[in-house]
Amino acid sequence: MDTQLTERILKICEAQMAKQGENVGLSFYAFFKNKNDEPELLMQVASWWIMTHRLDHFEKAYKIKQLILSENNT
């Protein structure tokens, strides 16, 4: 995923954890205001979420954050 998209995901994960705690669950739709506004980016995140990492529909925000950070540090 591109840098802007990963930054968006990190920002949303951090905001949701600040509001609801580290156990808050997110789906990949959480990173989009309207799931139809950016279909190419939505499909990119969906592919990363489902095909690359085989994640469940809802995952903990801290887990998503750690996956993004680990991929960007390699």
Image: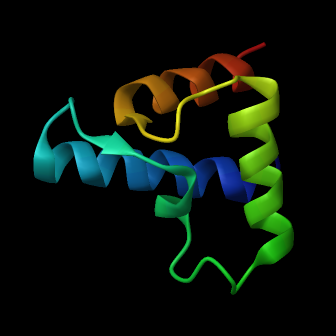
Q: Position of residue 21 (x, y in %)?
A: 13, 37
Q: Residue at x 81, y 59 (%)?
A: 43
Which quarter of the picture shows residue 34?
A: bottom right
Q: Residue at x 80, y 75 (%)?
A: 39
The quadrant of the image that shows the C terminus is top right
Q: How many marks?
A: 0
Q: Is residue 11 above or below residue 60?
A: below
Q: Residue at x 69, y 84 (%)?
A: 36
Q: Is residue 62 above or below residue 28?
A: above
Query: Is 25 positioned to the left or the right of 4 in the image?
Result: left
Of residue 29 and residue 6, the one placed in the foreground of this image is: 29
Q: Quick one: which residue is furthest to the front in this view?
A: 57
The quadrant of the image that shows the N terminus is top right
Q: Is residue 16 above or below residue 52?
A: below
Q: Position of residue 70 (x, y in %)?
A: 63, 16
Query: Is 53 positioned to the left or the right of 65 in the image?
Result: right
Of residue 69 and residue 54, the one placed in the foreground of this image is: 54
Which quarter of the picture shows residue 72?
A: top right
Q: Position of residue 46 (x, y in %)?
A: 73, 49
Q: Residue at x 69, y 56 (%)?
A: 5
Of residue 29 and residue 11, the one placed in the foreground of this image is: 29
Query: Is 12 positioned to the left or the right of 5 in the image?
Result: left
Colouring scheme, one of rainbow, by chain, secondary structure, one colour: rainbow
